[in-house]
Image: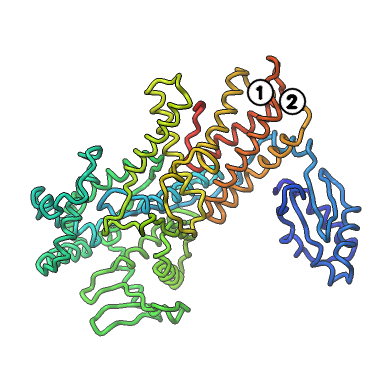
Amino acid sequence: MNILRDIIEPSLEAALADIGVSGDFWKNALGTSRERDQGDLSLPCFPFAKQLGRNPADIAEELASNLSGNFEVKAAGGYLNFKAESNWLAGKVMSGIEMPGSKDVLIEHTSANPNGPFHVGRARNAILGDTLVRLNRLYGNTVRAEYYVDDMGKQVGVLAWALANLSKEEVDSILDDKDEINPKWSGKADHETVRWYQAAQAKRSEGSQEIEDEISKLVHASEHGDDSVLKQFEGAYQPVLDGMLETLSRLGIEFDTFTKESKFVVDGTVSALMDRLSSLEIHDSADNGAHFLDLGQRGLKGKTDFFYRRGDGSSLYATRDIAYHMWKWQQCDELINVLGEDHKLQAKQVGLTLQELGERIPDVMFYAFIKLPEGKMSTRKGNVVFMDDLLEEAQAQAASVVRELRTDLSEEEVAKIAEAVGVSAVRFNITKVSPDKGFTFRWEEALSFEGESAPFVMYSHTRACSIASRVGRDSIPDSTGDIPPAMHQLMRVMACFVDKVSQSVNENKPHAFALYLLELATAYNSFYRDCHVITDGVVNEFNFAVSEKARELLRIGMIGVGIIPLESM
């Protein structure tokens, strides 16, 4: 709770100086109390024992007797425990929040190859990336959400070859009704076109050198900036990308800009970059004429040769990625990439190369993979759950629950609520898990409407909305009243709103704020139970003002993690 820290530190600094403690090393030790009943912040006094030659418990007792302010302080077992005074805390919380963000931030996320529908594994990147975008905006930063379009790689080359060489009848024959399209997605380009990609992959597995040569020729031409081939590639992938973006839009995920990989080949940036890389001290070349940087000289372990130019003079994906990063740094103060954990080596190579060129290294949020109970998701093995199908199932499950709870609603109203609940439940199920932790995706957990779920948070918000609707007017902001335990606990949680947004943004940990929202919803529910706003038709103005403040924080917090803030459920 930083608002409490701000008033404790000056008083504590003076008290420590009085007993002979020098330095400010103790500030890092002043942190959130482990147990709620201990207080809001705690300071261990053990580090002072050696410097003063005294017992930590005695130090804590003396400090407690010399500290005063808008807080309670108690010594216990060598610790100082601080708890904010209720009325002071209420005044701080009710006066509003101010977000400190001021940076221009570019966040590149998703950037999936446009060769087929989104599956749940791909969607983790998009959901985490979009949540970072939302939280940065909530924090006050100016944010640009960027999609890097792979418009010249092997996968789009395979797709382009398939569309140019295979008829629908051939595709159906090759696939032999495997991975048949769900009739629901008939006409949706990503679902339709992926069959051509799958058929081409099946033919490639037969070992046809002719097909491999044709695809390689296309890819090679694209890497040299061949305009006709790049247009052919765009014609192949753009409908698929549009279908993918339609799915993401249903999840509330949008992008501000799309940058094509080929841009940096066509405008000459990559050629100039390769010349510059060739002049570096750690540059070397292989027997086949390929050029690389020996990053082992810069401390890289393992695969130290970073190839950036083929023997025929064409660039590699990594080369274009370097050019892209140099361009991105011209657009922002801070750069964040969202990548799967299998890209760690590549990210390290890119970072070291940028550093060698005098550029800054971007922040990277790596995420672990989602698994199905039977194994890792893969478009090549057919072991997938498409995001479109998951969202349909989520909507159907939610509709079933809503119909049971609200028999007064029309089917149109049920469908609207169920869509919001289903989408929010799927997003939150993925967001609340730390990015560096993998987990097994299970339908029953994603669609749970109890416990640590989006519907739990949504229902808390609708409770506050219901109270506001019943009162039918704005609250009186400067009202005061008694602060019972449940209200004090809600105040404590609300006071940490900015802290938790700040942590999630500055540490790239969207799950931290998602878990905080669960804590806020739980605290509000206890307040709702114990601190009635309307009793016998009479409004308790202070309780109503507190409820309205909680409603505001719940609403903007939900938007921050992609939960849709309904007013009734």
Q: In this view, does 238 lie to the left or right of 212?
A: right
Front-lying residue, 136 or 418: 418
Q: In the image, which disc is placed on residue 407?
A: none
Front-lying residue, 158 or 514: 514
Q: In the image, which disc is placed on residue 479?
A: 2
User: Residue 244 placed where, x, y %?
Assistant: 30, 45
Up-down relation of residue 284 to residue 223 (above or below): below
Q: How packed is label 1: few (under 14 Cα within 10 Å), some, or many (20 or more)?
A: some
CA gap, disc 2 and disc 1: 9 Å
Q: Residue at x 70, y 42 (%)?
A: 492
Query: Which image quarter: residue 77?
Result: bottom right
User: Residue 99 placed where, x, y %?
Assistant: 61, 43
Residue of label 1: 475
The three-letter amino acid code for the residue at tag 1 is Ser
Q: Is residue 371 left or right of residue 90?
A: left
Front-lying residue, 71 or 398: 398
Q: How packed is label 2: few (under 14 Cα within 10 Å), some, or many (20 or more)?
A: some
Please say which color scheme the image uses: rainbow
User: Residue 470 placed where, x, y %?
Assistant: 60, 18
Q: Is residue 374 left or right of residue 103?
A: left
Q: Residue at x 37, y 65 (%)?
A: 322
User: Residue 538 placed where, x, y %?
Assistant: 70, 16
Up-down relation of residue 496 to residue 362 (above or below): above
Q: In this view, does 373 lie to the left or right of 501?
A: left
Query: Which image quarter: residue 357?
Result: bottom left
Q: Residue at x 25, y 74 (%)?
A: 310
Up-down relation of residue 169 to residue 156 (above or below): above
Tell me if label 2 and label 1 are in contact, CB under 8 Å. yes
The three-letter amino acid code for the residue at tag 2 is Ser
